[in-house]
Structures are given as C-alpha cells and as structure tokens.
Image: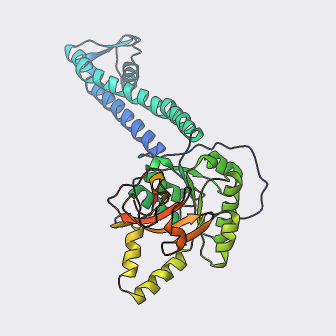
C-alpha cells in the first residue's frame, strides 16, 4: 500500500542500493564463524592443559591454567615470546601435528570473516550500486502483493531473467520473497520521485503497478508517467470507475481482475470450454499464445489473414484505432500497423514481439 498524501517533488535521484538474496543472515554467519573459532581455541587449550607436563615456563617453572591459556593464545596468533615452550618430544609432536593445523584454521576463519564482512560486502555494495546505475531494459514491479508477486512468478516462468526484474515495495517481508526469487529489490515508496529515479524508471522496458489500492496505484502511475513519458505502464485497478482515471493518469494497460473473473464466469456459463481456452491463453503452459508485434515488411499490402508467421490474425491497431479481422481495414496491412495474432506456443517469439504466455 502506497502513501497517497501530497508530497513535494524532488529532482535529486536518491541511489538507495538494490539488494539480492543472501542465503545466511549476516549475524548468523558471523556467529557461526566466531563460535567455530572459539571452539578450536578451546580445543587447543584442553590439549595444552592435558599435556602441560611437556611445557616449561621460563619465568617460575610452573605451568598454571592461566599459563596454558596464555601459551595457547600466543601460539594460535604465532606471536611466540619464548617464555613458555614445549620441551618434550610428545609436546613438540602435538604442536606440529595437531596445534599447527588448528592454528591455520583459526587464522583462515578470521581472515575469511574480515574478507566477508568488510572487503566482500563493500565490494558487493559497490557492485550493486553499479548495477543500479546501469539499469536498462529492465522490468520494474511497483508493489509485491498478490498481483505483483503472481506477475513476477509468471515472468520468471516465461524465461525472464530475475536479475532483470526490480521490485519496489515498502514491506520488508514482501521483499524477502522477491529476493528469494533472485530479483533486485528496493524498499521504498513508489509514489516518490527519488525512489523511481533510483531504479532508472525512464530506462525501463515496462512498469507493472499493483499497489493494493486504486488511489495509490493511480498516484504511482501519475508519478511514473511524469518521470518516464515513453515507458509502457500496466496497472491493476479493482473499481470500474477508476479504469478511466488510470488511463488519464497515463497507464497504457489497465487490468481489472474483478472484471476478468466475471468474464471467465460468464463465459463458462455459456460454454464449458470458453474459460478453459482463456486460461490456456493466459498460462505459460498453454498450447496457444497471443502475440502483439509490428507488421513485417513482407506483410505490407496483404490481408490480415495472410501472416508470414503462420498465425491467425485477430486485430490490427492503426492510428490509435483497433480493427478486427472482419473489418475492411484488415484487408490491407500498412507499414506501422500493430498486429495481434494467435499462434501455437511452440513457435518462438521474436525480440520485438510481446506474447501472452511465450
């Protein structure tokens, strides 16, 4: 749910870093490393304590438990002042065969921890910022509720690389689910200029808006259209009277799930297979797909029924108007026309084509 209160626009892009999923929480990883290191140190203390007869203290000749702890620490850290030293053959063998490998293991743990929490995380933060700055041709999903999450799942099922998807939502819990899918996520209010500029909204391939409330979604559409005049926007609204407002706000596609559900129900009442066919069109596993594409040069001058792809032409869009296959405008396709056709799923979709389930 987005904040619909009036706000002051900001022109300065706030580059809040994107995130991608990490399999182990930061504090969990740190705790595991420290616990393992302390366990190894404690093991060496026990070894030295049970083998203290093989050690000599140059200071007072007596090796106490404190001396053992002291000797363990300077031995593990390879400091070696020489005031306590192994003198028996067994003690030297223990140092060489048991303690030395443990010493290396502890050093590697601390070096690895320093790398993971300082060097690698700093590099990862820098890398994600670079990804953020170079975003282009990506899909921005604003709102990760029921509709938004289903859209992302469907995009991934259709072959979209999740790294090309940016999810923005104010809910940390929802973003964790998006991270688990491999998407880039950012916790922010999608109605704010700086948040949208941070994900380079003007460079996006398309924007999907599903804020959970119609007023919030329409406000987000207004903001996106202000910042990205040419980027296609699809929005989910639930009230019929808000569909017009969403289009006036700048949405290219307005989806009303309530109305679509009603269409499926009505269709199923009039024919047992209509709803099944519509679901087939919408599903990534369906046998057929709807494809929207520009008319091809070799198709110019031909009727809509003679498509080069072998599909069945349903509609053409020309000068902002829609013309069905039964209308005379469909008898001759012209350069610049947009064709909507239905074709089998096994026919590949080109880069300049958009499919319902390809």
Residue at point 55%, 69% (across, down) = 329
Asked if residue 278 can be seen in this view, the reply is yes
Residue 92 percent location from the top left of the image = 24, 15
Task: Tell which residue pokes out farthest to the bottom in this image.
Answer: 269
Quarter the C terminus occupies: bottom left
In the displayed structure, does residue 5 sit left or right of residue 18? right
Residue 193 percent location from the top left of the image = 70, 51
Q: Give 248 or 103, whichever is nearer the viewer.
A: 248
In the displayed structure, does residue 134 sit left or right of residue 191? left
Query: Across the whole image, how many numbered discs are drawn on residues?
Result: 0
The quarter of the displayed image where residue 65 is located:
top left
In the displayed structure, does residue 139 sit left or right of residue 100? right
Quarter the N terminus occupies: bottom right
The quarter of the displayed image where residue 59 is located:
top left
Asked if residue 146 can be seen in this view, the reply is no
Indicate how the structure is coloured in the image: rainbow
- Asked if residue 172 is positioned above or below residue 286 in the image, the reply reads above
Q: Give 354 or 63, whichever is nearer the viewer.
A: 354
Q: Give 229 or 323, whichever is nearer the viewer.
A: 323
Residue 169 percent location from the top left of the image = 58, 57
Residue 349 percent location from the top left of the image = 40, 55
Q: Give 174 or 288, whichever is nearer the viewer.
A: 288
Residue at point 40%, 69% (across, down) = 281
The quarter of the displayed image where residue 130 is located:
top right
């Amino acid at each position: 749910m987005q904040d619909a209160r009036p706000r002051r626009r900001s022109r300065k892009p706030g580059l809040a870093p994107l995130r991608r999923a990490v399999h182990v929480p930061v504090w969990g990883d740190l705790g595991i490393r420290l616990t393992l290191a302390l366990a190894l140190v404690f093991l060496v203390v026990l070894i030295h304590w049970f083998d203290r007869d093989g050690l000599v203290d140059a200071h007072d000749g007596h090796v106490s438990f404190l001396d053992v702890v002291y000797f363990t620490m300077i031995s593990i850290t390879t400091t070696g002042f020489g005031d306590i030293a192994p003198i028996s053959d067994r003690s030297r063998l223990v140092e060489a065969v048991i303690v030395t490998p443990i010493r290396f293991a502890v050093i590697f743990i601390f070096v690895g921890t320093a790398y993971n929490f300082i060097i690698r995380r700093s590099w990862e933060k820098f890398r994600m910022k670079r990804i953020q700055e170079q975003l282009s041709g990506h899909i921005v999903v604003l709102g990760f509720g029921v509709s938004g999450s289903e859209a992302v799942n469907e995009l991934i099922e259709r072959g979209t690389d999740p790294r090309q998807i940016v999810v923005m939502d104010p809910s940390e819990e929802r973003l964790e689910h998006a991270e688990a899918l491999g998407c880039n996520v950012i916790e922010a209010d999608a109605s704010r200029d700086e948040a949208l500029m941070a994900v380079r909204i003007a460079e996006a391939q398309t924007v999907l808006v599903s804020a959970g409330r119609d007023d919030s979604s329409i406000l987000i559409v207004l903001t996106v259209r202000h910042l990205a005049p040419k980027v296609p926007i699809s929005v989910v609204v639930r009230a019929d009277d808000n569909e017009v407002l969403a289009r006036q706000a700048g949405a290219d596609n307005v989806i009303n799930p309530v109305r679509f559900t009603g269409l499926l129900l009505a269709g199923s009442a009039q024919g047992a297979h209509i709803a099944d066919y519509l679901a087939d069109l919408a599903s990534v596993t369906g046998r057929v797909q709807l494809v929207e594409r520009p008319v091809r040069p070799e198709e110019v001058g031909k009727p809509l029924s003679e498509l080069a792809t072998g599909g069945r032409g349903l509609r053409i869009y020309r000068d902002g108007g829609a013309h069905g296959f039964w209308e005379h405008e469909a008898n001759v396709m012209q350069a610049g026309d947009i064709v909507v056709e239905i074709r089998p799923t096994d026919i590949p979709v080109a880069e300049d084509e958009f499919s319902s389930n390809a």
